[in-house]
Image (cartoon, grey):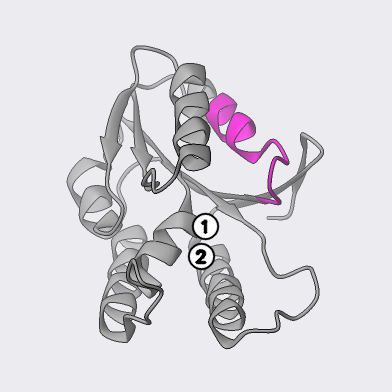
Amino acid sequence: MIELVLGGARSGKSRYAERQAIAANLPVTYVATAEAGDDEMHRRIQHHRQRRPGNWRTLEEPIQLAEIIRQHASPDTCLLVDCLTLWLSNVLFDRQGNLQESLFETQRAALLDALSQCKGPVIMVSNEVGMGVVAADPLTRRFVDEAGFLHQALAQLCDSVVWVVAGLPQKLK
């Protein structure tokens, strides 16, 4: 089963996904896509690390998510990917904020392909960023658009899609 968990910042989506992973009653491999580029992001990463059970295996991979899924998805392991939004940012832009069209297109296609062939449970967490005003700058608009397109493509592949608001999961699919 593949599940997509969407929600806004601090909506409770990661906590919900972690509970889902525990409920799978399988060993969990946590796939972290974040990189600590500043002190605030370092604190966020530390918060997530402290909350995870000590027996979970953690893989840190900011770019090659499809390869991780291909290598580690199996019927006897639950993969928990947190989060797709950061992964999207990593593949869409370089560290200077320049578009990486080729890398983005390759990695997006690889992710969708890996998930379509997936042989084990995968839970993916992502931020819904397209519910506000249209951003003033073109790079932010591109990011919001690509996140929306990615979520739509994933929702078609997923067995379950859940929207988390104020810590409350709402089943969409």
Identify the element where label 2 is drawn.
helix
Amino acid type at image mark 1: Cys
Write down the region rendered in magenta.
7-20
Image mark for residue 154: 2
Task: Look at the image and tell me whether residue 122 can be seen.
Answer: no
Question: Which residue sits furthest top?
Answer: 54
> Alpha-carbon distance for marks 1 and 2?
6 Å
Looking at the image, which residue is at 52% across and 19% down?
51
Q: Which residue is mark 1?
A: 158
Q: Where's residue 81, x and y in %? A: 42, 44
Q: Where's residue 164, x and y in %? A: 73, 44
Instruction: Tell me if residue 12 is in the magenta stretch.
Output: yes
Q: Is residue 115 above or below residue 35?
A: below
Question: Which residue sits furthest left?
Answer: 71
Q: Is residue 37 left or right of residue 136?
A: left
Image mark for residue 146: none
The image quarter containing residue 133 is bottom right
Which is in the foreground here, disc 1 or disc 2? 2
Q: Is residue 136 above or below residue 159?
A: below
Q: Where's residue 34, x and y in %? A: 40, 46
Looking at the image, which residue is at 30% across and 29% down?
58
Q: Residues within 10 Å of mark 1 (few under 14, many from 20)?
A: some
Q: Is residue 16 above or below residue 153?
A: above
Amino acid type at image mark 2: Leu
Q: Are the two marked residues, 1 and 2, in contact with CB atoms closer than 8 angstroms?
A: yes
Question: Which residue sits furthest front?
Answer: 39
Looking at the image, which residue is at 39% across and 74% down?
92
Identify the element where label 1 is drawn.
loop
Instruction: Tell me if residue 116 is in the magenta stretch.
Output: no
Q: Where's residue 173, x and y in %? A: 68, 55
Q: Residues within 10 Å of mark 2 (few under 14, many from 20)?
A: many
